[in-house]
Amino acid sequence: MKASVLAGVWIYTLVAVIAEVLAAENLHPVLVAASAVVTFAISQAAAAVLFYMNLKEEPGSLIITVIIPLMFLAGLLISMVASLG
Amino acid sequence: MGATAWLGRWVTTTNHKDVGLLYLFTSLYFGMAGGTLALLMRVQLSVPNNSFLSAVYYDQAVTMHGLIMIFWFLSPLAVAFFNYLVPLQIGAKDLAFPRLNALSYWFFLGGGILAVSSFFVPGGSASSGWTTYQPLSSPSFQPGPGPTLTYIGLLLLAVSVTLGSVNIITSILWMRTKGMGFSKLPMFTWFALFTTVAMLYAFPTLIAAFALNVSDRILGTGFFTSPAILSVPGIDPSILWDDLFWFFGHPEVYIVLLPAFGVISDILPSFTGRPLAGRNWILVATALVVLPLSFGVWMHHMFLTGIPLDLQEVFDASTEAISIPFGVIVIAFTLSLVRGRIQFKTPFLFVLGAVVLFIIGGLMGVFLSSPVLDRVFRGSYFVVSHFHYVMVGATIFGLIAGLYYWLPRMTGKMYNEKLGKVHFIVSFIGFNVLYFPMSFLTDMPRRVFTYPNTGDLALANGIASVGAFIFVFAQVFLAYNVVHTWFRGPPSGPNPWGSSDLEWSSGAEERTPAIASETAPVGGWIGQLASAATPEAHSPDAAPAETHGGHTSTRPFTLGLGVTIFFLGTPFYPSAAGLATMVVGALAVLYTFLSWARDDLRGRFSIPDEGEERWPFAALPKVKLGMWLFLSSEVILFGTFISAYTFIRTAVTGWPIASTIHNIPLGTANTLILVSSGFTMAMAVLSIRKGDQRALLGWLAVTFMLGSVFMGIKLSEWTDLASTGFTIASPNPLYQLAASAYYFLVGLHGAHVTAGLIVMVYLMKKTAAGAYTKDSHGAIENFGLYWAFVDIVWCILFPLFYLL
């Protein structure tokens, strides 16, 4: 991993933080603002996993190890919200 | 050996076989405690309108029986076998992280002591059933420190299981000897892998659920009983707990069951004289269907809570689907018997019993997948009968089979076969007399301390109580047989069952000197493996078990003791006695951390050699693999908290607007600081990869500074928020709930940041001493993963609390 790539990721995350704050304050309706904020948040997390944690260059088996709990969590979250009717 | 030396040996051991034996005997002790509670319950229910136990004591007995049996007996008994056998079966010297293994045991024991001691604390033990449903387990229904202590014990147990899972998974993936590819992995080790993967992803949810519960009880947060939730029409406040608990609880059924299937799969070939039928089908069915689906059926436990019908249909279908792979497994076991030359030895009899009882229990479970039938059966003794057929019948019979089967491996001696057969016959009769009548009690509510003298209730209950005493009496044969074998049993020979698994050849020389010379080569691929796995190279017994110098440590014990003492004080917070106890525990923990770091700085603890078969993780260092596994459990932990928060936010209307509570510009600036620390930590890792120690020290120092500033601003924010009345004691229910969620989750994240800062001081000290080089800097890489994870969690928490 090059230092320039890490710096690029850093700058992206800084911009994304500002962007999500602006989106939360300026976008309407709430659903659109929430979608934008969540997208920016997830993109920051993904950038950090791929580049800071270097998952991009790790073996595929490890990537699966990381994805499995995320799938379980997605199932939990969706079902919990759905259980509210 | 004197008493002090004997005690010192067991307190300091990190040897996998010693730890396995500790797990074995401790879990059997807890099994006796849980069984005693069961007998008390059966005495109470033996006749109608009985007053042997009061309602409160009966509730406590029911609750603690369930908790002890599931968490401190069934699972740990399997973990005992994992500890003892997995390294032997894969030809490793020890588990991947021996000290972590010992620490898991001491946390397990500490949790058990806390839970059991809750009987003697004001308020008594928990009495809301093993499911600890809300709001029954809230302070309104169960006041006092006693129940809190039970739940804290469970928390400690869950941490122990998570750490143990990381260890065993890493060992199986990374420590296999030459030639031990996945295709040759013994079935028991396969099932150990399945079980621990399920543990790794299920237990963090239990930690999350009980952390919220304990927070409600000690700190006064209101996750489960806030008036803000209770006042929402159409929302059952218990659903949040049900979701969290059963997302863990249903996989737990398989966590308990799968080790027994591993035992059965390993044992069958030894007594049928033919290979296990459908080995690959069993593995595929378990890995691709049972494991994933075990996390996708939990809502069938919630059909009566009023969840939408569409959702019930989805979970009805998934529950029926999960019975299919179990059908495949049972058919494979049955086919293994066909055309076999069966030897009716004790282990085989228990295997046969386990399979028969599992079929009965499994079939009863299929009825419960239907929402309509579930409405009739759910609250009745039919369910009690069903899950005991699975949890006790299949699991206990299977694990007892394993105990008889591997007793010669553990002791070098053979048990008494006649006594073993008597044990099986009396157990099988007692079990069925106990649980079969319950399957007809569909009109008797469970968890109720007495019943009227109507219909056949008295007859069925009377028969069941007689069965309970027969079943418990049968275990006396087991206890006598094990103890007698241990001290006076005749030599068993090196491989009494003619098994082809590696544990029967590696390490055999240590059992008794006489046996060592008898160790005979075994045919087939095992012979090749055995020659590769010479005792010197692969036996954990290269150093005698009594000494194993360089492989002992007091740190796991003192850390376990410190954490247990700390948790012992927490239910009594904020009393002076509670605080004093917590301080003593914290000091012990601090002392251990410093000592542990000093041990590492001086290289006092020898690390087991790496394995040669590491596919598909060959490119990853062992500790890094362990760190990734640990972080994946952390993902579940934080994800569960965030899911709970999302549930509450969705359920409650009128949630306070973030900008009216938080200082958004300050929060944004603080986020930019933490995000920047993620970058500087990544640069630190990059620097040492290039061998630049000075740059590493510099980047670490910058990261430390940014992290410290982040925490400083956070503390200042909390002070400001508290001064505006945004606290968990707020009289406004919505603010109280919002503050509970905010302080809990952000506080937990802050604790992670603080822990990272402490570790960073240690890393900087080592860096300054020149400990890390281009070729040896694993600790920096692993800490880089941790810090990035902390960064990522904040990337999610910041918008949740400050923007949405």
Image: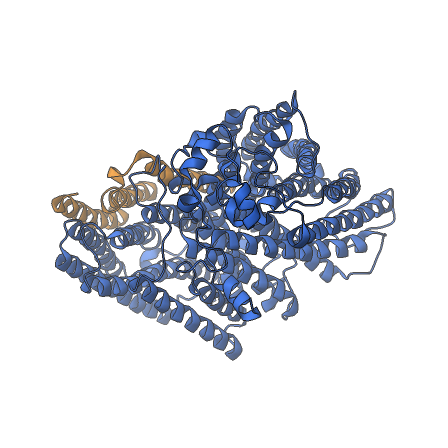
From the top left corner, tell me how far across and down residue B497 is, in percent. Answer: 61, 35
Give the colour scheme shown: by chain
Is residue B42 in view from this perspective? yes
Tell me where residue B364 sits by quadrant. top right
Nearer the observer, B68 or B525: B525
Q: In the image as oriented, which residue stretches furthest toward the top?
A: B339
Q: What color does chain A have in the rendering?
A: orange
Relative height, residue B676 to residue B346 (above, below):
below
Q: Name the residue nearer the viewer: B655 or B674.
A: B674
Q: Is residue A28 left or right of residue B350?
A: left
Q: Is residue B615 left or right of residue B196?
A: left
The reply to whether residue B212 is visible in this rendering is no
Task: Residue B30 in the image: state x and y as whole percent.
Answer: 63, 56
Q: Residue at x 83, y 43 (%)?
A: B460
Q: Position of residue B496 (x, y in %)?
A: 61, 38
Relative to B244, say whether B347 is above or below: above
Residue B650 vs residue B757, the one in the foreground: B757
Q: From the viewer's perspective, is B172 left or right of B368?
A: left
Chain (blue)? B
